[in-house]
Amino acid sequence: MLRIYNTLSRKTEEFVTLEPNKVRLYVCGVTVYNDAHVGHAMSALVFDIIRRYLEYRGYAVRHVMNFTDVDDKIINRANSLGEDPLKLAERYINDYAQNLADLNILPATVNPRVSGTMPLIIQFIQGLIEKGHAYPAANGDVYFRVTSDDDYGRLSGRKLEDMQAGARIEIGEEKENPLDFALWKAAKPGEIFWESPWGKGRPGWHIECSAMNLAELGEQIDIHGGGNDLVFPHHENEIAQSESYTGKEFARYWVHNGMLQLGGEKMSKSLGNIISIKEFLSKHDADVMRMLVLNGTYRAPLMFNDETLGAAEKNVERLKSGLRPASASAKGLTDGNASGLTALAETAKSNFTEAMDSDFNTAGAVAALFELVKGINTARDNGATNDQLQPAQSMLRELSGVHGLRLQEKQGSGDADKFINLLIEVRSEVRKQKLWPLSDLIRDRLKELGVTLEDSKEGTTWRWG
RNA sequence: GGCGUCGUGGCCAAGUGGUAAGGCAAGGGUCUGCAAAACCCUCACUCAGGGGUUCGAAUCCCCUCGACGCCUCCA
């Protein structure tokens, strides 16, 4: 039984879908005006892992992730670059899609954009006005009337009365209540705009997600995800809009990931402590970023530093060690020991599943993989043949694949192989003559070139890395 | 100040009523010409601190201290 922590109830609940075996999953994507950073990668990885696990559990997942391509920051950036805002957004959308692909993140089923959802957004706002949940102001803005929503604040645990004190109305706004938020913003001179019943303008930040949910998944969805920095006001406002519009419960499960921490602080564009995904991947394999996430708890802050990164790197190597072939001199295990290994693989699978069923406990699930790796490696040391290792190794592949790990040995150019093999052949002769300094020189120099040699009784093996 | 999450060994971290998983790091060993990899062994009488409930608590309740996030844009 799969159990998921629901931000709305602050409890771990049994996962029951609206339709049997189908999951409607919406995850807030990014505002595209700059390079995405590893904090965005964390969030995308968390929901990729969740989506992969749901699919492994047999659910058909319709995964929607939006791109916010109409926004103040995009407009500002475009103005400073003298570029068309939608062109700029398009560029960063392509960049981001490439980042996700490089991280081995499965593409969402659909990626709706604000600019492509305009008629529905306008219709949505119109509907809210008709029902008395929104009102157009004289300045051309349209605001959501928070007092019209009885349980406004229930996601983030806030009460309207408590929030009144600190709230302010910005210059130029014409709100009935300081907490009312913009559904539609009147265009300033020179800004990109769309025609609407309230004049030229563009949507506010929150309405887009309500509209795209409705367009792609319907009035009710199973899981709504995003970073926990979106709980208030973004998700709170989404609930208010969607439920006021449809009169139905919007999302059944609200799932929020914790923030990536760099130097004890949240990594964010405004703090400037950023490492871009591109930069990260120029130095590390995609599996390392994924392992960093898997090692942690998706809801908790995730430490990003040399130590946690180094551990993640070693962990990936360790999983890979389980996939190496039998030794050349393998004599075979007894039938009893071989079936013991197969049984171990089944145990690993049930421990893995049990952990993942418990609110996607990836750290516990990875621990099950390590137990399996140890069993495989011990069996190999004891002389297991490839046939005997095979069932356990395919289980390791299967389960690590559910986590989205590739576990690929690094590849060099195919042409290099024959030269490396030639060097190893020569070095073997050198070793026969016990010319150790020369033998070690070859090994050290190859290491510098990214080729690792390992000597054993059966001869020398090598791999990239 | 308000709301929320959380504090487990040097680091990351599982465990949420029955007596502390796993990984990294560290130390010792097997193997090796030496390495590397792999394997074996060691590594928290204790779970921020203090009360309480219970036969029994890291796990439940209360208080204190501390961290982080949100309350303005944010994954």
Image: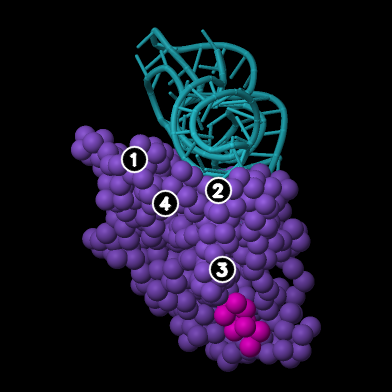
Q: Which residue is mark 2?
A: A432
- Dot 2 surroundings within 10 Å: few (below 14), some, or many (20 or more)? few
Count of numbered tags:
4
Q: Residue at x 34, y 66 (%)?
A: A61
Q: Are marks 4 and 1 in contact (CB under 8 Å)?
A: no
Q: Which residue is mark 4?
A: A324
x, y percent for residue A43: 54, 59
**Compared with residue A217, is residue A225 higher up or lower down, i.e. above or below?**
above
User: Label 1 is placed on what type of residue?
Assistant: Gly
> Which secondary structure type mostly characterizes the magenta part of the structure?
helix
Q: Residue at x 29, y 61 (%)?
A: A59
Which chain's residue wears label 2? Answer: A
Chain B: colour as depicted: cyan
Q: Quadrant of the C terminus of chain A?
A: bottom right
- Dot 4 surroundings within 10 Å: few (below 14), some, or many (20 or more)? some
Toward the viewer: A92 or A281?
A: A281
**What segment carries the magenta color?**
A87-95
Question: Which mark lies nearer to you, 4 or 3?
Answer: 3
Q: Which residue is mark 1?
A: A383
Question: Which mark lies nearer to you, 4 or 1?
Answer: 1
Q: Secondary structure at mark 4?
A: loop
**Residue lying furthest left:** A335
Q: Which residue is mark 3?
A: A419
Q: Earlier in the sequence, mark 1 or mark 3?
A: 1
Q: Is residue A367 left or right of residue A1?
A: right
- Dot 3 surroundings within 10 Å: few (below 14), some, or many (20 or more)? few
* Cα distance between the residues tagged 3 and 2: 20 Å
x, y percent for residue B45: 55, 13
* Cα distance between the residues tagged 1 and 3: 30 Å
